[in-house]
Image: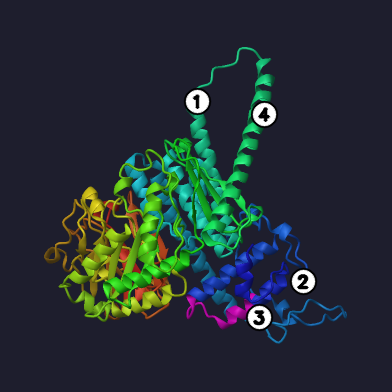
Amino acid sequence: MVRWAFDILGIEATKDVQEIKGAYAALVRKCHPEDHPAEWARIHEAYQAAMEYAKTTSPSAGGSMDESQDENCGWEDGNWQEEFEPLESGFNNYGREAENGEETYKNETFQDTEVIENEEYNTMFREEHFHWVQKNSEHERMLQKRLKKLAALRGKNAQIEWIHFFEKEFLPEEKSGALMLLLETVRKSELPENILGLIWTVMEDRRRRYAFREEQDLRRLEEEIMLCCQRKHADAKNKKVQRKPLSRLWILPALAAAFLVIAWSGQRAENTKMEEVSIEAAAHLNEKYGGGYYSEENFIVEKETLFNDDKDEMEYYRIREEERGPVIVCAMRNKKSKEKAYSFFDNVQAKEIKQAFAERINERTGHAEGCLFWDSKTDDYSSGGIEDGFFQVRYEGDFDAFIQSEIEARRKAPKMTNASSSSDARPLNGICEYYLPDPEVKTLKEKFERQDFPEDAELQTALEECASDYQLQVRGIMLPESFFEERMRNAAWDESEVSIGSDVMRSLGIEPSIPFLMLTGWYLSMPLKSEREFNIPNGMYTRETVLMGEGIYGAENQIRSYNFGLDSDWMEGSIEQISTPEFVELTEAERKRAVSFQMREGYALQTDCCLAIDKEAYGIAESGYQVIITDRYDGKAQNYRMDVKDYGVPYTNVRGGSILDGEGYVFLEYPEADSIDKAEVVTIINP
């Protein structure tokens, strides 16, 4: 259901179109799109969702929320690019009695609010809506191009690129249009089985997130993508089976009857097994936590489809307390193992355990101001691994004792024979990122103007000890104080928004979740076995900041074995301000307010870089500006209007296609040379 939309509009859920429009009109008059672009976009998104919901049945004054009619929520018509409708004069009679004596629907929230048609506002809203839709369309064009390239990849590099895509580009905040593009890619492309498994895994993770936030429309799309992955996987498997043609037609009815009997028997056996799993799960939880609170009668058991060459040897179930509720227990069993009992991992104490770890790591490092974000899932999740926040051992107040017992439980947990070629070297308790303020660097400007950032040896030692003792990968992220305070202030509202970076063991190199340009040190700490296996030394990593133009700083986004970093002497002054090219699609009015940048002829980047453009140096407005990225493939220019987000928003990253704004700078990614025909043009349009 789209209940979130009505919460934003400030009204009860309804299918009354006039009531929805009245609520929307009252809100947008208070929220100018230029002054509050993010709030305006959220209000408009809520309006669109509410109007789509209203279309599911014939609107009626004071229409009630009918749960049975809400199942599809308007998805079947696919019309999510509704044109903006101007404010109507009919709003003047909103909440009043009709002249014929019949009483119209009243809403106490708005009965004292006078909503007047204003042509200036109508024009402004139409223009802002056009730009809003255009930005979303450009983003979706970029995604469509990227998905087309990903779908054509094969081999080991394909999985690496897809993993990078989901971790850095296709973030959980994607809207319905982006999800539809992914669904179409899965439907129309012949994707390898391991890629289908990866997509299925990512969608399952995000489905639970949408369920928690009651974003049911997005969750339905996620479920459709998952279902499509399962169907494609089954089709691929069936194609491998060679069937001989039947020579006698009379065999067909008998064969069909036999299949029905087998299918019925198999389903009956599976239902019996699910009942057993439900009983065992309730017994496990009651024994672990006491009190007899849990009952199998309240559980919904789902068998999960796994993706691996040895998937048939593993049984994996998820248990919910109610239909469509969050998963609270996972049950797993290896059918080839001598141990026939299921292993159960639950998330009942997830928040408490993660808070205890945050306090413990602060004690061990001596930094009470540190902020920890922990993703505890195992690497081989798509092969029946353990999800983030799920633990087998009960936490009873001593984190060190708890984690040692949990390590043993995870070592004994069922796993597939070939789940991962190097799974023994991977930490058992996942990845965590530990944010700290740099007391020597107050602002990002100070960071840009310095080059020497010595390693904090005591911090590195403490983090390595935590990585070894707790069997996880720890990344310390040192930020300038102002940036740290802004990020952590926003993260405090919702820790699930914080994006944890790629696992260095499976990526092409080291790539922090915060660009090197914006941090003063990235501390990598892994258990000794992992460090040796993957030949990635523990320690502090940084990249040199280069003055790439007047008021323009740059640094590499990642460290890879095959490049040697920016040559500061050569790359200094490599980016310049240019006259905005004709192939950048702008109106005449926009062109007069635009400033453009491009890498000089003869220069080329060996890897993607993060740039920081000083707004004051180029007369860029403090807020309300737009950014267009123009690149040229095969001689054709592609223009993309990008979203500009506050640099303190936890999930944002220039690697994901975001333009960040903060401390007087515009932050963006500039690509390596071989990714486009000619150097990318960056255009910033003042309001």
Mark 4 or mark 3: which comes first in sequence? Answer: 3
What is the quadrant of residue 97 in the picture? bottom right
Query: Farthest residue toward the top?
Result: 247
SS category of the residue bearing label 3: loop
The label number, if any, that marks residue 62 in the structure image: 2
Would you say residue 252 is visible in this rendering? Answer: yes
Q: Would you name the residue on which mark 3 appears?
A: 117
Q: Distance between the residues labelled 2 and 3?
A: 23 Å
From the viewer's perspective, is residue 136 above or below residue 626? Answer: above
| Image quadrant where one finds the C terminus | bottom left
Q: Distance between the residues labelled 4 and 3?
A: 64 Å
Residue count near mark 2 (Cα–Cα under 10 Å), binned few <14, some 14–19, many ≥20: some
Query: Farthest residue toward the bottom?
Result: 112
Q: What stretch is highlighted in magenta?
A: 24-37
- The image position of residue 330, as x and y in percent, is 51, 51
Q: Is residue 594 left or right of residue 50?
A: left
The label number, if any, that marks residue 684 in the structure image: none
Q: Which mark is in front, 3 or 1? A: 1
The label number, if any, that marks residue 241 in the structure image: 1
Q: Which mark is in front, 2 or 3? A: 2
SS category of the residue bearing label 1: loop
